Image (cartoon, coloured by chain):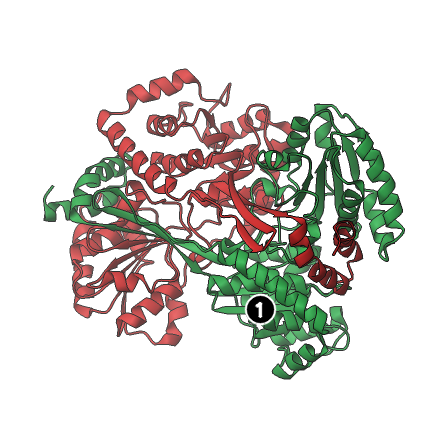
Chain colours: A green, B red
Amino acid sequence: MKVIEYPERKQWDELLKRPVMETEGLFDTVRGIIAKVRSEGDKAVMAYEKMFDKVELETLGVTEAEMDEAEALVPEDLKNAISLAKENIATFHASQQFVGKKIETRPGVICWQQAVGIEKVGLYIPGGTAPLFSTVLMLAVPAKIAGCREIILCTPPGRDGKVHPAVLYAARMAGITRVFKVGGVQAIASMAYGTESIPKVYKIFGPGNQYVTASKQLVSLRDVAIDMPAGPSEVEVLADETANPAFVAADLLSQAEHGVDSQAILITTSADLLQAVRREVERQLELLPRKEIAARSLENSKLIVVESMSQAIEMTNDYAPEHLIIETKDYESVASQVTNAGSVFLGAYSPESAGDYASGTNHTLPTNGYARAYSGVNLDSFTKKITFQEIVPEGLRTIGPAIETMAANEHLDAHKRAVTVRLNEIGR
Amino acid sequence: MKVIEYPERKQWDELLKRPVMETEGLFDTVRGIIAKVRSEGDKAVMAYEKMFDKVELETLGVTEAEMDEAEALVPEDLKNAISLAKENIATFHASQQFVGKKIETRPGVICWQQAVGIEKVGLYIPGGTAPLFSTVLMLAVPAKIAGCREIILCTPPGRDGKVHPAVLYAARMAGITRVFKVGGVQAIASMAYGTESIPKVYKIFGPGNQYVTASKQLVSLRDVAIDMPAGPSEVEVLADETANPAFVAADLLSQAEHGVDSQAILITTSADLLQAVRREVERQLELLPRKEIAARSLENSKLIVVESMSQAIEMTNDYAPEHLIIETKDYESVASQVTNAGSVFLGAYSPESAGDYASGTNHTLPTNGYARAYSGVNLDSFTKKITFQEIVPEGLRTIGPAIETMAANEHLDAHKRAVTVRLNEIGR
């Protein structure tokens, strides 16, 4: 970890720089795969599964029998944990339901919004070493609450042609009935355009490697919406002298173990805390099974001491972390000054892993500084708001002349006439 | 206009097809301009203004004196109209303010969301024949309400080096103080990366031609958020035998005059109404100054009669129109079944132009079927929601073991340890 002491304002940009994730350069590669899936459907998907996932599939859909088998394989303690997490995620996301208000902007001019679930959504769950059943819950539970009618899930099978049981179990618990064994670019292409087996959806969610990200971006240019742009995961701990160095170190390490490109940053007002955290990180690192990944990731990571809490907060908002843990005496006051962050964890007993799994908040969050403009996944992500307006004659008499004037000044006479023909009938 | 009578279900896809807008093919062209603005700043912007807008500028910022001059030039009736529209837009968008609720998902586990205005936003207003001061209001008024701290506006100057007075006046009325004379790709590049004069922003809003759209898409791949993908404007009128053919025709024409690629569609259950609307369109077309544009646009447009209201609604949701006008006897019941649309206008006295200018709803809406997954611009568009969680020892004792189990099953031991070190301290 790099230690940076009292940096000057002009050094901040350099200091807070993230590793650049270049997806545009992959467009040509992924474009070819997408085109082939689009034109040849299941046949192409199966060929790519053979090529990339080393598996020969006869059908893409997971069967009811496979779902039953998975359920039998998941240990009881994990089932209970998934159940607790699912309930909390459901409670928090259900509380986000939007109820539109009817607003009379003028007498007889009534406007309102209504949130409607996106009819068809596709969830992508990556394969790899860790079975991300938690991400299944984070995407499927709000999709159900939003009222999405068709929710499908794509995830790459292992070489044995099977999906990890915990992923299938989480899907079933969340109410998803259609799971397909397909990963990578071919999964994104299938959901964007549909194949014989896999239905086309209107919005695609979920994490993935740089090829998945590139293909999501490419299909989103015209054909389907996506949750958000993605980048490597990151955490910032903002701490003062009251923080517990062992907790802070554990939080930094829990980010570092994600992957070698993860970033973990400490910003503190206490030089003593910084040194204590440093020692704790070294001590705890030795205890981790994934210590090699964590050690490499720590090379990107920084321990920064600044002069004041207000400077620490300013630097935090500049960085716009995906996850922000605030371990300070007056963490509520600090939190109220946070303007750029994905998800914020307050106090000594709110580790990031609580939000990753079970507090109820979503763990699909804006990385790479996107928190400056994007929200994390939440109930809104699975709905769209339609606006409605109902104008009665009294209302049109009030606002009609203004519309006529504005339309005429924008040289849009037919717009003006649509009001005039009505005012002529009802009388001005 | 093409008349289609009682089409079969399998013909719908073909029938509802839109003209394809291909922006990816423009990426190479716009990439060069963006790179030059990024590396050379104002100097490049001025060179492109000379090349594309045929104007030599010495400074890019509109001065306070120019704002004063514009205000003096806007006629009183237009000022009053802008004022009425601005008030209604403000009333409706202010009503959309989000208030997060604190939710206790388990005792001692408190989660909430907070909406925070995006700190820096850039608004783009195209040039061309019509001065789109209405779009200034539609973007700037909600940006102000959302609490965006820095709101800038870029718009191309005329050959005289000036911006249309109504655009400047609307900007001033909406509280925007920083307006820059720059259009097209160079405007988008300036806002995405910043120049000496023009500050970098976090999100870019506003309509534009295919080059503007392509450059918004390109910069959104990594560097800045955008409002939504854009395409040609469109309206659908859904009507039964009770509709007024003169009103329906006026509404179709007000869409058609936008541009030759605009689409106007009538879906009706009444063959008689269809014929009456057809005659009215022909009659009213002759009265329009922009009748040549409207006539060409009408070539893309369709009058469709279907067998039942339920079929009409199904077809509407399939099409997912940007604007939907419902002129039927029981329009409230019909509206309750609409699942895909941008903005919906109910009854005989709610023309689209009301929403375009002054009812209070936003006119920046999802075209090209994007209404299946996207909302139109609304207050949410200018904010992001940050999630917060505060867990006290009691709460961590409740959810901690589930987190440990889930983390262990995802092979993320440091995630588990971040809970364990805390539970060890407070006791399980």
In front here: A203 or A243? A243
Residue B141, horizontal then vertical, whole percent: 39, 35
Q: Quadrant of residue B320?
A: bottom left
Q: Secondary structure at mark 1?
A: loop
Q: Is residue B314 above or below residue A267?
A: below
Closer to the camera, B357 or B11? B357
Q: How far from the left and from the top, in percent, is residue A407?
A: 26, 39
The N terminus of chain A: image quadrant: top right
Residue A383 is at least partly visible in this image: yes
What percent of the width, then of the height, locates residue B29? Answer: 58, 43
List the residue tagged with mark 1.
Answer: A174
* Quarter of the C terminus of chain A within the rendering: top left
Looking at the image, which residue sits at the far bottom?
A65
Which chain is home to disc 1?
A
Quarter occupied by residue A38: bottom right
Say which residue appears at 62% left-offset and 55% top-offset: A359
Q: Is residue A205 left or right of residue A72?
A: left
| Residue A192 visible | no
Q: Is residue B410 above or below residue A398?
A: below
> Which residue is located at x 19 percent, y 53 percent?
B247
Q: Nearer the viewer, residue B189 or A370?
A: A370
Q: Could you say which is closer to the camera, residue B50 or residue A244?
A: A244
